[in-house]
Image (cartoon, helix red, strand yellow):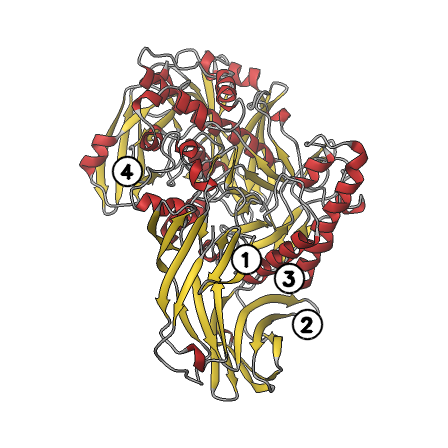
Amino acid sequence: MRPCLLLLLALCGADPAAEACSFSLRGTWRIRNGNGSLELPGEVPGCVHTALLQRNLIQDPYYRFNDLNYRWISLDNWTYSKEFQIPFDISQWQKVILIFEGVDTVSEVFFNNVLIGRTNNMFRKYEQCSFSWDWGPAFPTQGIWKDVSIKAYDICHLNYFTFSPTYDNYAQQWKLKIESSFDVISSKPVPGQVIIEIPKLQTQRTYSVKLRPGKRIIMLIVKINKTITVETWWPHGHGNQTGYNMTVLFELNGGLTIKKSAKVFFRTVELIQKPIEGSSGLSFYFKINGLPIFLKGSNWIPADSFQDRVTSDSLSLLLQSVVEANMNTLRVWGGGIYEQDEFYKLCDELGIMVWQDFMFACALYPTDVDFIKSVRAEVAYQIRRLKSHPSIIIWGGNNENEAALMMNWYSIDFTYLPTYMKDYVKLYVENIRELVLEADKTRPFITSSPTNGIKSIEEGWLSTDPYDNHFGDVHFYDYTSDCWDWNIFPKARFASEYGYQSWPSFSTLEKVSSEVDWFYNSNFSSHRQHHENGNHQMLFQAGLHFKLPFNTDPLREFKDTIYLTQVMQAQCVKTQTEFYRRSRSEIVGGEGHTMGALYWQLNDIWQAPSWASLEYGGKWKMLHYFARNFFAPLWPVGFEDKGVFFIYGVSDLHSNSIVTLTVRVHKWSSLEPVCSHWTPDMVMRAGNAVLLYQEPVSEMLQRCGHCTRQSCVVSFYLSTSSKPLSSTNYHFLSSPKEAEGLQKADITATISQHEDTFVFDLETSAVAPFVWLDVGSIPGRFSDNGFLMMEKTRSVLFYPWRPTSKSELERSLHVTSLADIY
């Protein structure tokens, strides 16, 4: 792809008091393929695929097998060209620059047919997941995917402006380090002053500066007034996301003024790796503003193969769904992209902590001079761009490359291993780490994920066992063991990847498929599954505890199978996440003190089976509804060990809670509980997981009478003064496929509207596991879904994301529970 520009000069003169004249080249360009047989208009920012789609020259690239059909687009060369007139006389300015914010990826830039530059890195200012992973298609895009502009200036120009708040423990004072980079083209030094104001903190400072010719960086330290209380930025669920408006005004000789405005957030972050009593390893947890915080959340991948389709609204919808599911963290995974500014701005506002990987994943990278030079430019640019965001709490050097090398994923000849290890250290330690430590001292850096942290450093940055549960973070996937057995999960310090697949809803698949595709073993189903043996693994895992659907109607069976994969995924991830949450305060066999659970993955890049809890377009899978519960700030967790039933209470709150635990045993055949048990008031300590209840299952069944493991199920919830503090959790005493007395439930729904919200009043004729309310393609979410309905009536709210009506919802509603698929 070769952008080409043709320039025509004209129009207005220079204003010496202005910092610069700027002219955006956003808008319509001409796009031409290699041999000139195809030429069309295309929007910038954008890419070739979306330009072709907008002109109806191709179908939706996500439709059926179009990721294969449209490979010719990526294999061709494309030229972007634009003729334009600059609305100012560039001869009146001392310097004129052409700025490409992002070019994808290898290109030559011609200006009036003169070669003026080349690009080879998508992540520098002038993609890697584009070539497919096991959750997405291969669409190596080409295009000008970010802004293009021409800027002219005299005297000097502000290249970038960034800042970092830090807390001086010795002085007991906040300080703000402001970094400004200038291109000074004046032949003489340019004196002036800088005025910094943060009104709400009653802070105003004036500094004298002198800019000497050339590239110059000004560092200023602003001490915040100690008599003013600074409200800190907190993660979601732990406090407010307070920010302060700041203005920085440069008044330079010659009447030149440059003004910048920004929002400043104050917070501290520490990664604690210290010895733990009762364990041979080290802790691995984060303190925000001095408070240990359990990280709850998921892993983020690019929201679309075609980044120009990712809007502020679509990002807002996805990130709002993060906090609505009681998450506080996203890991921006190192095989995708550095997200757009709006993503981090929204994370700041919503209180979503970001674990930010650099874009290196699952590969052995070169270390030649040109590549290292490109990497250093990429890393330096991204640090400058992102370090002012309080949401980013850690930099990660790569995804899984320490593990890949030391576990020999690529079958490296042992004699070459020292060379690869040396290259690893050169890239991630001697270059990336060096740049991070030099440019950003406000947050920690780790070389890889998973890693053993300090232990890896002691072993020369590459640990012999990067998955050691006693150190750092772990990634864990197991599709053949029973996911209901918590004993298979690693009792690690921090779980930064784990998960199970499911299929997206039929309403999501229907948009990109045809009727011949609608069965589980279709060519479409196989093609859409990019994880080897993934479709079989889902059915295997589901079959361990559920009867697999069978229906003479292939479409009905397909829809039932989709439903069951979502039940399986939700239940598997629930079991694993609850295991991590209840392990936060205990050490067993030297393992535990788990302080983070980030499942793989949050979102989808297209309509296909994957590990995501949010479908492409934002629709919540059953897993996301489950996450809203299992990530709740107060949550009871039940499990069995050697025939004994335990319930732990997990708290993320900052203060102790007085709670009562209610435990009920229900028969599958009755809507009335067989027996109920209430504990006396108990104290749940803040930021802890504590044992609330234990009883041998045999005694519980005997106490309740007329109950067996197959005929009964347990529910439990927390309350105070008879007011619920948590949703109701449950524990299966046997696999649902062995349930005795489970009947097909007749569930009716009466819908009413209250302002912008709709109320679904449900009534059931029998106990109904995994009740799933689906309104097809009407965008929105329910207050709860996928629940066990053990009472005759229940009300659920629906929050639409666009205007809808009672009648549209009634026409679209489909209710499914487990017995319906048998």
Q: Are marks 3 and 2 in contact (CB under 8 Å)?
A: no
Which badge, 4 or 3, comes first in the chain's sequence? Answer: 3
Q: Are marks 4 and 1 in contact (CB under 8 Å)?
A: no
Label 2, label 4: how many angstroms apart (C-alpha)?
Answer: 56 Å
Identify residue for label 1. 118
Helix, strand, or loop for circle 3?
loop
* In this rendering, the label closer to the viewer, 2 or 4: 4
Helix, strand, or loop for circle 2?
loop
For the residue carrying disc 2, how many other residues have a C-alpha within 10 Å: few (<14), some (14-19), or many (20+)? few
* In this rendering, the label closer to the viewer, 4 or 1: 1
Left or right for 792, reference 621: left
Helix, strand, or loop for circle 4?
loop
Q: Which amino acid type is shown beneath numbered disc 1?
A: Arg
Is 305 located above or below residue 290 in the figure? above
The disc placed on residue 778 is: 4
Pinpoint residue 660: horizontal percent, then vertical percent: 50, 36
Q: Which amino acid type is shown beneath numbered disc 3?
A: Asp
Identify residue for label 3. 440
Which badge, 2 or 4, comes first in the chain's sequence? Answer: 2
